[in-house]
Image: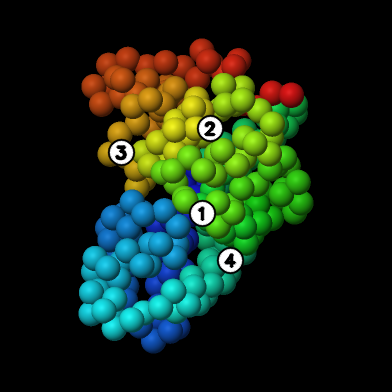
Amino acid sequence: MDGTLADTERDGHRVAFNKAFAAAGLDWRWSVDLYGELLEVTGGKERIRYYLQTHRPDVETSGYTDADIAALHLAKNRFYGELVAAGEVPLRPGVKRLLLDARAAGLRLAIATTTSMENVTTLLEHCISPGAERWFDVIGAGDIVPVKKPAPDIYHFVLGALRLRPERCLAVEDSGADLRAARAAKLPTLVAVSDYSADDDFRGAVVVLPARRTPQQPAVSPERRRASTAHRPIAAWSGRALLRR
């Protein structure tokens, strides 16, 4: 979801977090670079807690509670929804066409994400189409599993609901941590690199698509990605790709 279907992180969630902090009278501000560091932690509430532990020990030791963090996260989601509704969080290029083509081909679609269901619904409704939630057979989101990515739990949940073996599916992710989650669930995985994940380790991916890729730019096999000496077109493997009926 975040970073894969849409460029949600830098100018979406980060901005919404800062709005929530300001509304609560806090002097916290997450810069673009700091947020890139915090993205190593999946889950918004978990990210706030990590920030307190690593950057604001004065606040952490004063007893900032789980309820306080949950309230901040709830406010963040409200501000994020306002940004999405205002058109400030765009889909990544080609995403809507890919989803439409997949549906036309009779492929089954699912979402496996650590973001909240509220955020998923808001993005689908405003950025894709009213009723787009129904395009997906299963949506696994938020706290539906106890352990978030890079643990594979959310993928196990979605695969179980789909009643499909992992080798019958293709995961699409944007970061090294998310790739590890998908591969731990034994899913073949395509990586569409985002701005924040350009330096991540993508070994184990089926193929890697560079950030801000143009239609003429070929995909890169992860083994040769850093050397940039060989490429493998997406068409070479797409016949065994997404979730087939």
Residue plotted at (41% across, 26% down): 205
| Residue type at numbered disc 4 | Gly
Does label 3 or label 2 sit earlier along the sequence? 2
Label 1 vs label 4: CA separation?
24 Å
The total number of labels drawn is 4
Give the mark nearer the N terminus: 3 vs 4: 4
For label 4, the crowd category at 10 Å Cα-Cα, with few meaning under 14, some 14 to 19 and many 20 or more, is many
- The crowding category of the residue bearing disc 1, from other C-alpha atoms within 10 Å (few below 14, some 14 to 19, many at least 20), is few
The residue depicted at 34 percent of the width and 47 percent of the height is: 196
> Would residue 165 appear left or right of 62 to someone viewing this image?
right
Q: Farthest residue toward the top?
A: 236
- Looking at the rendered structure, the secondary structure element under dot 2 is strand
Task: Looking at the image, tell me whether mark 2 or mark 4 is earlier in sequence order.
Answer: 4
Foreground disc of the pair 1, 4 = 1
Instruction: Look at 48% across and 77% down and name the residue there.
Output: 67
Image location (x, y in percent) of residue 41: 36, 54
Query: Which mark is nearer the camera, 2 or 4?
Result: 2
Q: CA distance from mark 2 to mark 4?
A: 26 Å
Residue linked to disc 2: 171
Give coordinates of residue 16: x percent, y percent: 46, 69
Q: Which residue position is annotated with label 3?
A: 200
Tell me whether the residue at label 3 lies in contact with that at label 4, contact meaning CB atoms closer than 8 angstroms. no
Disc 4: which residue:
81
Compare residues 212 and 159 and report the one nearer the observer: 159
